[in-house]
Image (cartoon, helix red, strand yellow):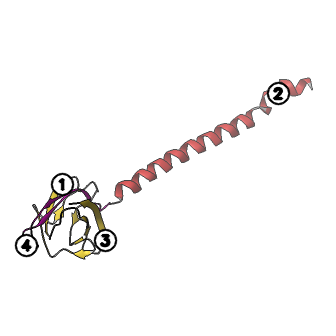
Amino acid sequence: MNKLLKNNKALSPVVAAIILIAVTVAVSIAVAAWMGSLTTDSMEVSELTIIGLDFTFGDSQTGEIAVQVTNPGTSDVTVHRIRVNGEDAGTWSAGTSTTVESGTSDTFMVKQLVEAGKKYTVTMYMNDGTMVGSYTATA
């Protein structure tokens, strides 16, 4: 028994195994974090946020809805179609371009009959039909 307590070699394999496991876990966490950052950086997000609607009253020729948008995504968004209350907007134009660059804002003008007290839902779509933004407000 006395010989077993004086033998320092019996403790060494246990300590070595614990250190090996700790190093393996630390390296795997570092690799997982590195791989996670690679995949998030390479993903492009197409997103358009409608931040507000301003209404100008009039008839279908003179009434307008000003749709204020911002692009918080990582890629540029080109608006192909705008719908108001589920129907395609007949005439609309962009402030500068139909493409809203990443990190910028713009205003789209939609010719629309606007009635006071009525709710309007404006939805914007890209070329492939993907909805990129929607907003509801009362005139």
Q: Position of residue 66 (x, y in %)?
A: 15, 61
- Closer to the chain start, of discs 4 and 3, is 4
Other residues around mark 3 within 10 Å, as few (<14) / some (14–19) / many (≥20): some
Q: Secondary structure at mark 4?
A: loop
Residues in magenta, as a range: 45-69
Please tell me which of labels 3 and 2 falls first in the chain: 2
Amino acid carrying label 4: it is: Gln
- Describe residue 3's horizontal placement relative to residue 78 as left or right: right
Q: Earlier in the sequence, mark 3 or mark 1?
A: 1
Where in the figure is residue 34, as x and y percent of width and height?
44, 49
Location of residue 40 (image quadrant) = bottom left
Q: Quadrant of the N terminus?
A: top right
**Label number found at residue 73:** none
User: Around disc 1, counting alpha carbons within 10 Å, would you say few (fewer than 14), some (14 to 19), or many (20 or more)?
Assistant: some
Q: Amino acid at mark 3?
A: Thr
The residue singled out by tag 3 in the image is 130
The residue tagged 1 is 105
